[in-house]
Amino acid sequence: MSRKKLKKFAENEERYNVVQPGKAFYENCKGNWKKEHFKNDNPIVLELACGRGEYTTGLAAHHPDKNFIGVDLKGDRLWYGSNVAEKEGLTNVAFLRCHIQNLEQYFASNEISEIWIVHPDPRPKDRDAKRRLTHPRFLNIYKNLLEEGGLMRFKTDSKPLFEYSVETAVRERLFIEDLTFDLYESDLLEEHFGITTRYERKFTAEGHMIHYMRFRFDKPLTEEEEKEKVYGEQVDGGHL
């Protein structure tokens, strides 16, 4: 292992915003992120397979009223995002080092408000379909962690992966709010605040289009439906 990588790992051990094996909070973070780590009650947003955390830190700078957690297994990648967060004074940022299939060990049901998946490994071989981050087995994990009406955002340069993901969302009866096969020619680009990853810059330079989808597991209630729901709960609870 190189000296540079060893230095990064050592710094990760000392950084509050890196949650990884060997740290006390790593074993007790489930359900405790707001109270124990961020020390506020703001919504939590995840970036899965975050790499260097460009979206974790970029979105955190634009949304100081939300908490952002980048999740990845590679500690040297997390170091980059952690470093940016420290330099920019982003106290609403954390990085969790773990396998994505084990997310339920680190987050409680309904603890998350939003999940971003940005340029994940496309896993093009059929035998690797279960490892795609939009496979039903992962979607079931996300559904359990997201609060009611929680939002999913998916971005990729891989057209086959995007088509697979859209087809899976339709088959699983998810509510697709919007999608585009060419993000840079879409109004949906505004949702990204100019944030790009180093891979995305490489892909676009090679002429690849960027695909993007925003979806939920349940269709959001209309204002009238929300009022009816609240009224019904008050009646059932004996408040009226």
Image: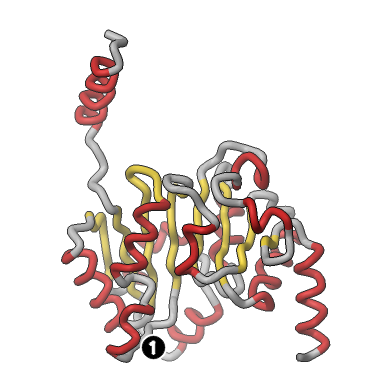
Q: Residue at x 49, y 62 (%)?
A: 103
Visual colour scheme: secondary structure
Q: Residue at x 40, y 50 (%)?
A: 146
Judged left or right of residue 51, residue 84 is right
Secondary structure at numbered mark 1: loop
Query: Residue flagged by tag 1: what amino acid is it?
Result: Gly
Q: Residue at x 20, y 62 (%)?
A: 172
Which corner quadrant holds the N terminus?
A: bottom right
**Residue closer to the observer: 109 or 188:** 109
Quarter occupied by residue 116: bottom left
Image: 146 above or below 171: above
Q: Circle 1 sits on which residue? A: 207
Picture coordinates of residue 178 (x, y %)? 26, 59
Image: 237 above or below 179: above
Judged left or right of residue 112, residue 157 is left
Picture coordinates of residue 77 (x, y %)? 64, 76
